[in-house]
Amino acid sequence: MDRNLANLKWAGYVGAVVGTSALTLLLAPFQEQINSTTVGLAFLLVVLFVALFWGSKPALLASVLGVFCFNFFFLPPLYTLDIAHPQNWVALAAFFTTALAVGQLSARAKRRAEEAEEGRREIERLYQQLRVAFERASHAEALKESERLKSALLDAVTHDLRTPLTSIKASITTLIDEARGKAEDESPVALDPEARLEMLEVINEESDRLNRFINGLLDLARIEAGELHLRRRWGNVDEIINNALARAQLLTQGREIVVDIEPELPVVRVDERAVSEVVYTLIDNALKYSPPQTKITISVKRFDDAMIEMAVEDRGIGITPELRERVFDKFFRATRDADISTHQPSGTGMGLAIAKGIIEAHGGSIWIEGATNNKGTRVIFTLPIGDEQPADESNADVVIGSRSL
């Protein structure tokens, strides 16, 4: 295995050298007939292909070799590393910068696609393990549950892995087609700088989307394996809510958000980042499943002497009582009324499962009720206020045992 990886690594560097050398030999006899722009685009195409097939390091080598060959064989004075005209300095610098950027972006897109494919295979492997375990416990019940989970997993893979990969592939293909067309003096795809930047932004955003999906799967795996680490600190509830609202700022534009915090609430000893993630998830769900003209209410009050209660309430159609427990299952998403949304809101069905794991890891509970006047959904969770800890223990990680979601 290691030998194969080493061979593949060296193949990338050999490919960079061979590709650059072959292009130089091909174009050198016509150095007086072709302009420097065409030559630069041709070398840029070599960098792009090297990055797509072998990654960023061989692409970096191809970029350096391309700069050398471009300067030595095609920029006057020929066959020296001297540069006579200042414009050639600009052309050389622009080529090298563009080659580095294209190489890195292409290699990153390739790496993200490989990680997504690896994640898909891991999901399939986990599904197989679940199916075997269910069959051992109860064949009939396990078969029914495994089919439901398989459908949910395939839906998540289809939407949250294939869709970003499709966007990344389309953007990369368009950029390659444009570069190839320019190199051959005929461009079937003509992109202006703004369109080219938009393509790169699509690649960046969809790569982030894949990263979020994979991180969600990892969070679920940690929770189920009992490896969720909490870093408890004393903090104010209003700071936790403010952090969640700051993160959701773009989502909440144009929506009325009401925050109602009971006066003189005590500070709590929690993992602020993890609890803020829970609040953000609940706000995100409330926004997705309620009409845009309705308000979202966040309320906090004392639950008892040892606990506080926080709730996020919307004015949507609500969740039927028989589904209120199931929405905390992995990959489960309640069907929504067509009057609220003409399409199924985006999501993976992991958010509430992760939220439940975080709250239960703190020693709290989370559940769903009908909202005020039974109009909408009210998601409620409790958190322990916490006990005083010795100074040398206040910053320790807390590892929670395995819990089933």
Image (cartoon, rainbow, N blue to C red):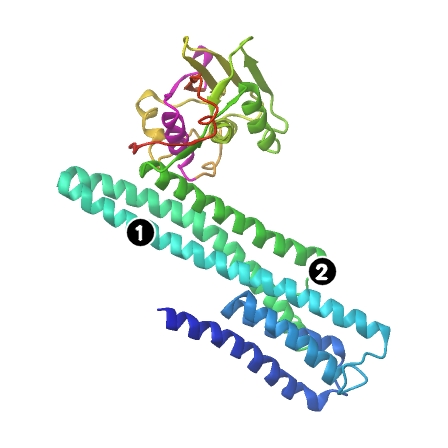
Q: Is residue 296 visible?
A: no
Report, in whole angstroms, how far the alpha carbon at label 2 lies from the one at label 1. 42 Å
Picture coordinates of residue 239 (x, y %)? 57, 23
252 left or right of 281 in image: right
Dot 2 corresponds to which residue? 192
- Please, what secondary structure does the residue beneath circle 2 have? loop
Dot 1 corresponds to which residue? 124
Picture coordinates of residue 347 (x, y %)? 45, 38
Question: Residue at horizontal 62%, vertical 83%?
Answer: 23
322 left or right of 375 in image: left
User: Taking 53 as reference, is 246 above or below it?
Assistant: above
Q: Nearer the viewer, residue 383 or 208?
A: 383
* Residue 223 is a magenta residue: no
The kind of residue tagged 2 is Asp
Magenta span of residues: 348-376
Picture coordinates of residue 400 (x, y %)? 35, 31
User: Taking 381 as reference, is 94 above or below it?
Assistant: below
